[in-house]
Amino acid sequence: RTTTTTRSAPAPPLTPSTFYLALMGCPCCRRRHRCRSRTVARALAPTPTPTAWRRRMMPRRKRATPPRTRLRRGTPSGTCRSSGTRTRSTSVTTSQRGRSRSGTGRAESTASSAAKITMMTGTRLKIWDDYNAEEVKITKEEAKIISRMMKGKTPHANVDPYPDYVDWFEYADKGHPLSNAPEPKRRFVPSKWEQKKVVKLVRAIRKGWIKFDKPKDEPNYYLLWGDDTDTADNKRQGLSYIPAPKPNLPGHEESYNPSVEYIPTQEEIDNYQLMYEEDRPKFIPRRFESLRSVPAYEKALREGFDRCLDLYLCPRTRKKRINIDPESLKPKLPSKKDLRPYPRTCYLEFKGHGGPVTSLSVEATGQWIASGSSDGTIRVWEVETGRCLKVFNVGADVHHISWNPSPERPILAAIVGRDLLLLNAEVGDEETQVRTKELLHVGEPTPEDDGDKKPAVRWVNNDKFDGITLIHHRAASTVEWHSKGDYFTTVVPTGESRAVLLHQLSKKHSHHPFRKLPGLPVAAVFHPTQKMFFVATKKFVQVYDLQKAEVVKKLESGLREISSISIHPGGDNVIVGSKDGKLCWFDTDLSTRPYKMLKNHSKDITSVTFHRRYPLFASSSEDCTAHVFHGMVYADLNQNPLIVPLEILRGHLSSDRRGVLDCKFHPRQPWLFTAGADSMIRLYCD
């Protein structure tokens, strides 16, 4: 609907097209008074004024808020662009304006508004009330109130909707709370329903009904074909970028004008060609008069190519370096001066053998020493003077020799060829000689001895040397005495079940207590104080209890092949030598593995030995040296043995790639005897 108030001048005639345009708006844009279609404007509207033309051509601004009913004062008559009629004032409802803009084109929607606001001249305003079908006059103040309410504001401008809060109650300096009501019981008693809920949730979690979402690991992507030089990006992606090592700079050996003594001769250059490529020097120095005369390096292209191959193919690893003072890594050992006496210098040389001296043995009192050689002789020497007292020409190689530890029994046990020979050393007084001859006599065999079983060893009198020969079924290698001097043992490496034999001198009896061994036996020794027996194979050391006939311990050496063994006088420590130049110290009370492993020799260790009184032990090797060590064993079990290297004894010469073959300590003095392949025996003293 359109309410028009005109002046006294008559209004133009209302045609159907003009009425339709006034009611529904322009048919092209559905907007009133905003038509931009030139065809409709030219056909219906009169010639527009400059102001109207400017309004028509100006772009219409978009509103942020929905259209609302606007209150306007009465204005002079204007020109409608669509109908061309001049109106004094026009009032259009909000709903009608909104529907006409939305393009619905329905005239019935204009009657849905609640009121119409009529623009009048002066200060009077009128509102059309559809419900009562009448105009209501309002004042300027009421119009302002309506306008503020339509904008969502308070009716009056002097009203503050958000005043400052003022606390009407003051609790400061009050002695009692606002309420003295007692606390309810529910605040102190746990909730039964919460407990049931928790139990239900726990049961569901345990049965797997409720599953928690595991945090997903985000993939860490990086450029597969990216540039490796981007160290910052690699560090961010977690890649351990390692720069390439720089090439070595040339040294003084590549000087173009070296000294004359550094220039090799033609003969030396020819010898270089006979060497292996890895041992051959990479650069042969030459001399030039000036730097200009130095030719191009002939291996530059090859070395550059090898450098590229190294950068391309060789993987790089980051070597962790720890700045540690090397002196702090060395164990704090006592001074050698505080550990004296120990053998240091050669005092005597015993000469007389025509072949390598294979074995040594010192008499219990320390006055005599016996030696066996591959020239088929056994010699007895006086220690203090070096005089050769007795020579036994046994006619075969002497592999091992051992002197009876009892001073009352000057008997020598020697492995000659493949059998064992017991000899009277012919030292001591007459009474001792008589008892020795009685021991070294085998009587007639008794019927008990002639059993069906084949004896392990046959005891036969040796009339040539007034001794006894023990004939073995296989070749024997070593012989060792018990500390009391009545029992001794021989080792037959290829004897299988008879590889280790025990013999009793007083009864002239032999037996083999070990039916099976874990390997080929190398040596066997008695415990100095207990009924224990040590058997050294190539890999292990078996400790047997002779009374119970069972294995007590098994010492694991970890060596390539054991060559010799020696027991400490206390019986709880064992040293083992090997053919790879290593020496192992075992503390049987501590562990079955080596307490210390020493790598001092460059070749095979041939013999190891302990001193009976002094805290010394030694080892000999085929590298023509003998090493002397300080080995202190404490009575306190909580303190480990102290091992200190003392001296390296040299002097023997190599023969057929063999060096020092045996070494033995003097029983009372800190002296060491060594036997070499150069057919000499040396005595080293402090």
Image: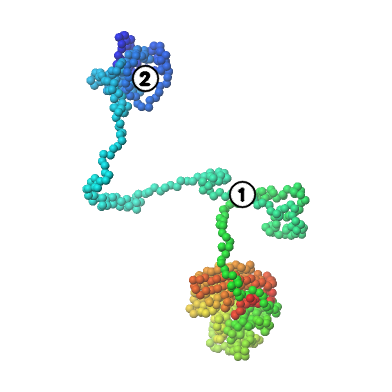
* Residue 302 horizontal side relative to residue 445, left or right: right
Visible residue check, residue 622:
no
What residue sits right under mark 2 in the picture? 31
Q: Residue 640 carries which label?
A: none
Q: Which amino acid does label 1 sit on?
A: Leu
- 584 versus 235 height, above or below: below
- Callout 2: SS: loop
* Image quadrant assignment for residue 420: bottom right
- Cβ atoms under marks 2 and 1 closer than 8 Å: no
Q: Earlier in the sequence, mark 2 or mark 1?
A: 2
Residue drawn at 65 percent across, 86 percent down? 465
- 468 versus 235 height, above or below: below
How far across and how far down the image is residue 240, in percent? 54, 50
Residue drawn at 60 percent across, 49 percent down? 244
Residue drawn at 56 percent across, 83 percent down? 485
Q: What residue type is labelled 2?
A: Arg
How far across and how far down the image is residue 298, in percent? 72, 49
How far across and how far down the image is residue 461, in percent? 62, 86
How far across and how far down the image is residue 404, in percent? 59, 82
- 372 versus 438 height, above or below: above
Mark 2 nearby-residue class (10 Å; few <14, some 14–19, many ≥20):
many
Visible residue check, residue 155:
yes
Quarter containing the C terminus: bottom right
What residue sits right under mark 1 in the picture? 311
Q: How far apart are marks 2 and 1 (CA)?
A: 80 Å
- Callout 1: SS: helix
